[in-house]
């Protein structure tokens, strides 16, 4: 009987694995098509200065338009894209689109809002990445300091010379570098010294706990002090309540991002929140938003 049970269990597992593999293969081929048929869109979420809540940047967040019209967030499909080697193409589209849309909407002044783009490990290892970024900036006339690249700290785990070199070249161009999701990865504090980061994004899990107790509060306070001590600006992610905002501001956090300040939305919607006077060289809004 035990043997039979064992076999049943085995068959159960194979069926399940089989189904998972099938789903995975289906997703992979849908992703390949999505790249060709440009089913991707960018939403943007405002990042505001803590003092005065003036929006200073937008984070570009990838969305995938489904046949039924709904938008899929990248949580799952980004991982698959990385594994099957599609992230290079998708990532290149994201960078190009984010730079183009930002330049169109806000113009080319160095003081206009910046755009923050998430970058995957694979992309940084690709020797053509830095060249692509340089070309996209030049093609759309966006000053390099208006582009921020967000790198999740886990990425830096494998310290290949390619990654180190890419980060230093990007820094040399004047592009700003942020360490994303700080505190969640396999953090090594020495990264902060070794790589030319400008900003540190405090992960949402610390932000949501910050107002729950003295220990969590001290942790956030310490992260902010440490970042400042190393010459990094701090951005709090996932700020959802006034209480969190007030606490973070009182601890000197420089910038805030989260549902309290604005949810990710199509560029045309977001644009309404930014003063148009900042964009003398921008094209009319209808053009930038026309293909939505
Ligand atoms: P992330 O870079 O840490 O981006 C922040 C995520 O938190 C976004 O999820 C955003 O919608 C969400 N968020 C913002 N404010 C709040 C809040 O107040 N509360 C809550 N609960 N969530 C908030 P999203 O858009 O689903 O993106 C998830 C992750 O996918 C991103 O995390 C980023 O790591 C990755 N990602 C997004 N776009 C791209 C892309 O173009 N390329 C790559 N490689 N990764 C991307
Ligand atoms: Mg990010
Ligand atoms: Mg991230
Ligand atoms: Mg993050």
Image (cartoon, rainbow, N blue to C red):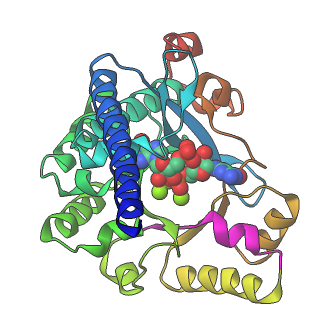
- On the picture, is 24 further left or further right than 110? left
Residue positioned 16% across, 71% down in the render: 160
- The number of numbered badges drawn on the structure is 0
Residue positioned 67% across, 34% down in the render: 274
- On the picture, is 10 further left or further right than 260? left
Residue positioned 35% across, 50% down in the render: 11
Q: Residue furthest right?
A: 243
Note whether 235 is above or below 140 in the view shown. Answer: below
> Any magenta on residue 98?
no
> Any magenta on residue 204?
yes
Residue 1 position, x and y percent, is 41, 65
Using the rendered image of the protein, determine whether residue 147 is visible from the camera's viewpoint: no
Using the rendered image of the protein, determine whether residue 6 is visible from the camera's viewpoint: yes
Note whether 165 is above or below 120 in the view shown. Answer: below
Residue 51 position, x and y percent, is 76, 60
Q: Quadrant of residue 169?
A: bottom left
Residue positioned 17% across, 44% down in the render: 131
């Amino acid at each position: 009987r035990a043997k039979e049970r064992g076999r049943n269990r085995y068959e159960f597992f194979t069926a399940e694995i089989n189904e998972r593999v099938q789903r995975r293969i289906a997703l992979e081929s849908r992703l390949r098509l999505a790249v060709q048929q440009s089913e991707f869109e960018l939403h943007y979420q405002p990042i505001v200065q803590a003092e005065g809540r003036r929006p200073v940047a937008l984070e570009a967040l990838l969305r995938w338009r489904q046949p039924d019209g709904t938008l899929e967030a990248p949580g799952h499909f980004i991982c698959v894209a990385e594994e099957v080697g599609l992230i290079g193409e998708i990532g290149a589209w994201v960078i190009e689109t984010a730079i183009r849309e930002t330049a169109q909407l806000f113009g080319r002044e160095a003081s206009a809002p910046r755009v923050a783009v998430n970058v995957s490990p694979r992309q940084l290892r690709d020797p053509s990445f830095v060249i692509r970024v340089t070309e996209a900036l030049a093609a759309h006339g966006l000053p390099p300091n208006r582009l921020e690249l967000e790198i999740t700290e886990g990425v830096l785990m494998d310290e290949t010379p390619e990654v180190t070199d890419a980060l230093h070249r990007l820094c040399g161009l004047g592009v700003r570098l942020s360490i994303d999701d700080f505190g969640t990865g396999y953090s090594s504090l020495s990264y902060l010294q070794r790589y030319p980061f400008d900003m540190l994004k405090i992960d949402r899990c610390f932000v949501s706990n910050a107002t729950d107790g003295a220990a969590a509060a001290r942790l956030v306070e310490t992260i902010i002090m440490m970042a400042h001590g190393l010459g990094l600006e701090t951005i709090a992610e996932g700020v959802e309540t006034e209480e969190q905002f007030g606490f973070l501001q009182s601890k000197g956090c420089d910038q805030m991002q989260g549902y309290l300040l604005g949810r990710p939305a199509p560029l045309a919607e977001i644009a309404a929140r930014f003063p148009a006077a900042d964009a003398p060289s921008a094209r009319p809004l209808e053009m930038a938003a026309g293909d939505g």
